[in-house]
């Protein structure tokens, strides 16, 4: 039996799901509706851990291999505090330009017959009425979810810190967190290379800094100039580049129900993952894999597939949410950590979610643990 599946949103979740489904069910009609033109996207680069890439290969290893060809990779993470860099070895990270990721996924989808419709915003009263299945992959501000917010039991909360996503034309060696404590507050930059000459810089300040630095009253252009001034050395004197870069508070989205009628939520529309625990893109693509797997075993039995998707995926998402909550609290409390030594701060950061233990750290990052030991921060006995 052939089904018509409409996917709202041509982000990583919607495109990867569409590709996997069309490959498995070539007779299904799969249409992706995307409000933007094909070459448009916000942001710069997205980062994946080595483990995340292995997991994504469970969807289609060939796709991930193809994406890897466009990635920058590194194995250390750096924490810079009080002007001193602490190196954390034993990591594995790769980053890709978001636009490259989307363009590659679009090409793969088009080549196997997924219908891609750009420049069309789906905002009708009953978007689910002209298809068998509607996949809401329309991001954290999903209007599809919003139409049935009470049925999905949607909860949206706003976090305290403010952040903004920039680019900079410089190549950092590794995924780096730089903390700068100035008279008027504490500033945090998460930066990593995603092309040979380009890096992402996610800028973050806590609520007190937002007020004390005067950023609350500034325009976004003034905030960009202000952050650039504070991070001048880290930026190697290069300007921050904006791409619809707006300072905002992170919105946490959760849904008590993951599907309603013939509509199912995936990616950021389902749960917006906080960037401080890693990759929202990875989680969005993992949702796509799990929903596809559910259809693989349930065939055209939509309700069974939806239920299986939620049963398999919810515990994993909830475990990550609990880690994210701890990580969020860590960043919101950053001002109180500025008196720590660089080594103490780096260790505190690595242990912040409870997912990493000192024992695992000793196994994964022996050089880092040796640095901590030399600094008297962690005993290796
Ligand atoms: C500051 C910041 C930093 C981040 N850093 C990282 C990072 O380093 N690594 C990482 O992996 N992720 C990062 N993310 C998160 C990442 O961008 C998302 O988690 C990921 O893109 C989610 O994928 P998605 O497909 O669910 O949604 P999205 O990527 O948001 O895609 C949704 C798509 O739906 C379209 N759309 C929305 N509404 C409609 C409509 N009504 N009709 C038609 N189309 C519609 C949108 O245009 C968009 O293309 C970051 C996000 C932010 C804001």
Image (cartoon, rainbow, N blue to C red):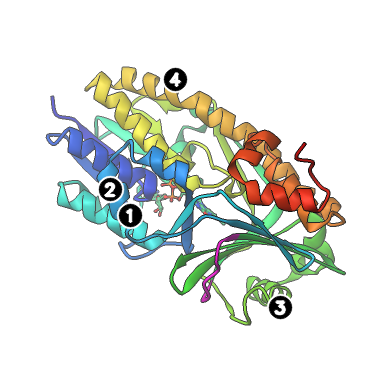
Q: Earlier in the sequence, mark 1 or mark 4?
A: 1
> Is residue 304 positioned above or below 110 on the image?
above
Ligand 1 near label 2 (Cβ, under 8 Å)? no
Q: Earlier in the sequence, mark 4 or mark 2?
A: 2
Mark 1 in CB contact with mark 2 (< 8 angstroms): yes
Q: Is residue 378 visible?
A: yes
Q: Earlier in the sequence, mark 4 or mark 3?
A: 3
Front residue (pair 192, 325) = 192
Mark 3 surroundings: few (<14), some (14-19) or many (≥20) residues within 10 A: some
Q: Which contiguous range is marked in magenta?
A: 168-175
Residue 28, numbered circle: none
Q: Nearer the viewer, mark 3 or mark 2?
A: 2
Q: Quadrant of the C terminus?
A: top right
Q: Is residue 166 left or right of residue 305?
A: right
Image-quadrant location for residue 306: top left
Residue 170 highlighted magenta (yes or no):
yes
Indicate the secondary structure of the residue bearing disc 3: helix
Q: CA distance from mark 4 to mark 3?
A: 48 Å
Indicate the secondary structure of the residue bearing disc 2: helix
């Amino acid at each position: 039996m052939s089904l018509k599946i409409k996917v709202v949103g041509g982000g990583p979740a919607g495109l990867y799901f569409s590709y996997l489904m069309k490959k498995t069910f070539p007779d299904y009609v799969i249409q992706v509706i995307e409000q933007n033109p094909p070459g448009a996207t916000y942001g710069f680069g997205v980062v994946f851990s080595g483990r995340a890439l292995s997991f994504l290969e469970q969807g289609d290893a060939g796709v991930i291999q193809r994406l890897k060809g466009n990635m920058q990779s590194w194995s250390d993470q750096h924490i810079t505090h009080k002007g001193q860099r602490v190196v954390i070895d034993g990591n594995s990270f790769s980053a890709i330009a978001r636009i490259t990721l989307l363009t590659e996924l679009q090409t793969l989808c088009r080549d196997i017959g997924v219908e891609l419709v750009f420049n069309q915003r789906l905002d009708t009263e009953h978007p689910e009425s002209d298809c068998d299945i509607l996949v809401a992959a329309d991001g954290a501000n999903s209007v599809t979810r919003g139409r049935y917010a009470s049925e999905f039991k949607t909860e949206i909360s706003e976090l305290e810190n403010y952040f903004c996503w920039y680019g900079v034309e410089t190549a950092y060696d590794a995924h780096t967190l730089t903390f700068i404590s100035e008279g008027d507050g504490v500033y945090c930059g998460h930066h990593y290379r995603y092309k040979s000459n380009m890096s992402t810089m996610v800028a973050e300040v806590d609520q007190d800094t937002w007020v004390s630095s005067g950023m609350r009253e500034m325009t976004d252009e003034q905030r960009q100039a202000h952050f650039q001034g504070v991070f001048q050395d880290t930026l190697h004197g290069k300007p921050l580049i904006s791409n619809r870069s707006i300072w905002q508070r992170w919105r946490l989205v959760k849904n008590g129900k993951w599907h309603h009628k013939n509509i199912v939520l995936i990616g950021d529309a389902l749960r917006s993952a906080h960037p401080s625990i890693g990759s929202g893109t990875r989680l969005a693509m993992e949702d796509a894999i799990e929903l596809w797997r559910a259809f693989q075993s349930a065939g055209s039995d939509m309700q069974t597939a939806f239920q299986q998707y939620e049963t398999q995926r919810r515990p994993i998402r909830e475990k990550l949410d609990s880690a994210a909550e701890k990580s969020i609290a860590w960043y919101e409390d950053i001002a109180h950590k500025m008196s720590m030594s660089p080594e103490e701060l780096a260790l505190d950061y690595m242990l912040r979610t409870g997912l990493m233990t000192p024992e695992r750290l000793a196994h994964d990052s022996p050089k880092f643990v040796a640095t901590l030991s030399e600094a008297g921060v962690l005993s290796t006995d």
